[in-house]
Image (cartoon, rainbow, N blue to C red):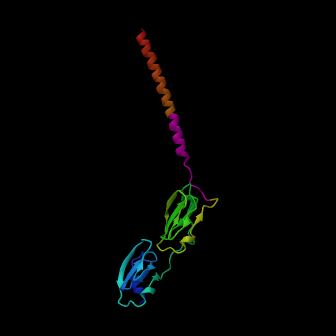
Amino acid sequence: MAITQQHWDEAPVWANYLAQDANGKIWAYEMEPRLGFRYWVSLDQTRATLCGTDTDTDGWEQSLTKRPDSQPTAQGYVPDWSTAPEKAEFHAIDKDGRGWWYQGEPLALRACWRWPDATEIWRNMDCNMQYGLDGWERSLTKRPAQAPRPARDNRKDKELIDLRVENVALKAQNSALRDEIARLLREKEGS
């Protein structure tokens, strides 16, 4: 049995692999499945869906086929450090194509990056590559020394200081008014 272009034409757009089980069912997988006893298994808990059957099951164990068109790669992707959180020191892309900012250096595991310490992480919403990313384990990038950090909005700091000064002035006025009212009441009672 051979996976053909017709099978790919019927596969969902998110599918990166097709494989046939021993019973003839052809499945589309988001991530690369592993060979089981009589079927293919998606170990990463990612999407899989039935997309056809074929009565010719000879060689089903060798039926795993990667999408023929070119797969996206992590090579060439440069994160925009001006949008990174101030504490972020590293950027990496998981196998599923999602980018993440890390405060500490993460480690590459089976299909994603994980941080060994209790450091902060943030989702990079600008990095949404396609599923089945090749070379994801080489996507770790350290913040360049000259990379811009998010600009601090000094106007907000000045507004906050102005509000505090105004608050102190109001408290002083309030205190002075209380003192003046108390003096007037004492004068009235005394007369």
Q: Residue 120 location, x and y as percent?
A: 52, 56
Quick one: 18 or 43, which is closer to the camera? 43
Give the residue drawn at x 39%, y 77%.
12
Image quadrant where one finds the C terminus: top left
Q: Residue 101 location, x and y as percent?
A: 53, 61
Give the residue drawn at x 50%, y 34%.
166
In the rendered image, which quarter is residue 56 located in? bottom left
As for residue 133 lying within the magenta part, the answer is: no
Q: Residue furthest front?
A: 37
| Figure check: 64 above or below 182 | below
Q: Which residues are magenta?
A: 147-166
Quick one: 29 or 131, which is closer to the camera? 29
As for residue 152 lying within the magenta part, the answer is: yes
Number of marks in picture: 0
Q: Residue 42 location, x and y as percent?
A: 43, 75
| Figure check: 84 above or below 166 | below
Give the residue drawn at x 57%, y 71%.
138
Q: Residue furthest right?
A: 145
Give the residue drawn at x 57%, y 60%.
81
